[in-house]
Image (tube, rainbow, N blue to C red):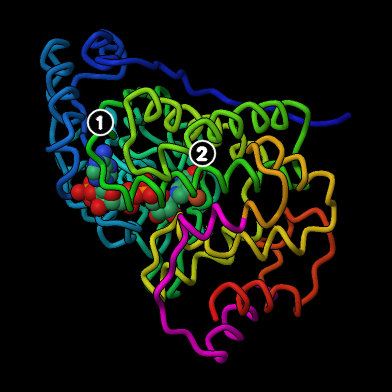
Amino acid sequence: MNFEYFMPTRILVGKNIIVNNYNEFKSFGKKAYIITGRNSSKINGSLDDVVKALEFANIEYVIFSEVEENPSLETIEKAAEIGKREKVDFIIGIGGGSPIDASKVIAIMIKNKELTKDTILQSGKLCALDVIAVPTTSGTGTETTQYAIVTDNKNKTKVNFGQEVFPKIAFLDETYTQHMNLKTTLNTAIDSLSHIVEGYLNVNANIITDALAEKSIKLWSECIEELISGEISCEIRQKLMIASTMAGIIIAQTGTSLPHGMGYPLTYFKNIPHGLANGCLYIEYLKVFKNRERVENIYKLLGLKSHSELENLLSKFTKLDIEISEEEIKIYTDAMWENKAKLKNHPENISYEELYNIYYRSLK
Ligand code: NAP
Ligand code: FE
């Protein structure tokens, strides 16, 4: 056995966890930069709690609330300019994966003042301001990963920004997810499931990530009934949040694999939300995976008996309504095939035809 495991994020879990722990913010500096999406954090209580905690701790703050879904480098650069001008000491990212990912890139850009949206993706290893994460979706696990996925409009794609910024603290309070609509709840839940599965069927999987995968997939399976019914209790919301954070810890070690690489053009060109973009490829992805013992173990942990039971389950969660041509499928397959970095975590040989067929059979 030969592997490395690294997870430096402190994870604090529970109701009112932010306000109860306002002292935690004091060691990060005198002025915080709060980064959010456009609306949800103002409604679900997360922004109020952060502001309250900062006021208790006597810390000044500035708020940037313009991060869009699949954050663009343009928005990130704009936020970084404000952060530099305001001389902020640390960053608090509140929201789904988009604002928290944006926070990580902004943290790098403020610390390295010469960087622009055109140079950030090509830069060597850089330091960042400290980032604290407050997830309000249960999907990306970004609160416990070093990654940030940004939209690069120049190259018409979504990419990982290439730096490593683990949040210093992740505050998990499932209350913020209580009123999330069912569509976003399902899309994000499918994202976390896909992180667990891609971490498990991965060239970098090890005994620790396997243990995390087996436990978190079990936790996720306990949520299936309520995800199907659409009536989701607070207890299940907490399980979804913890499973998602555990999934983040897994992919921080392993990286993701084929469905994530293949899903990005579906988000960029077809506007399909991230979790759904991966999830819609899963039935076909699991069919081509050759190590059946590993795949069967996933079914078992999910409480399913066979691939057809999985098909039945996923088809409830991943309904798609898009127009796509064979030409487009070929372009996406070519891009995936030529980008060896996107194939390297898949532990088996895969052919061009198999990749093409995953797209074709999933989307046509
Ligand atoms: P998101 O793009 O952050 O947000 C999706 C939508 O959900 C937005 O409209 C947002 O509203 C809303 N929302 C967020 N929290 C809510 C709540 N508690 N109640 C109601 N609505 C809420 O979605 P996401 O799926 O969490 O993040 C996706 C992004 O993360 C993608 O860019 C993906 O590539 C990336 N990702 C990153 C990692 C990583 O390790 N870094 C892993 C997987 C995916 P507002 O905009 O108003 O806030
Ligand atoms: Fe993801």
Report the mark closest to the observer, 1 or 2.
Answer: 1
Some atom of ligand 1 lies within 8 Å of the CB belonging to the residue at label 1: yes
* Closest to the observer, 362 or 55: 362
Q: Residue at x 41, y 42 (%)?
A: 227
- Residue 74 in the image: above or below residue 321: above
Q: Is residue 148 visible?
A: no
The residue singled out by tag 2 in the image is: 146
The amino acid beneath tag 2 is Gln
Residue 12 as seen in the image, left or right of residue 284: left
The crowding category of the residue bearing disc 2, from other C-alpha atoms within 10 Å (few below 14, some 14 to 19, many at least 20), is: many
The residue singled out by tag 1 in the image is: 176
- Residue 312 in the image: above or below residue 205: below
Q: Position of residue 354 (x, y in %)?
A: 75, 74
Some atom of ligand 1 lies within 8 Å of the CB belonging to the residue at label 2: yes
Extent of the magenta region: 311-337
Q: Position of residue 34 (x, y in %)?
A: 21, 35
Q: Position of residue 284 (x, y in %)?
A: 67, 66
The CA distance from mark 1 to mark 2 is 23 Å
Secondary structure character of the magenta stretch overall = helix
Quadrant (top left, top right, bottom left, bottom right) of the N terminus = top right
- Residue 178 in the image: above or below residue 105: above
Q: Position of residue 44 (x, y in %)?
A: 18, 34
Image quarter for residue 5?
top right
* Closest to the observer, 332 or 324: 324
The amino acid beneath tag 1 is Tyr
Q: Of the residues under marks 1 and 2, which one precedes in the sequence?
A: 2
Q: Secondary structure at mark 2?
A: loop
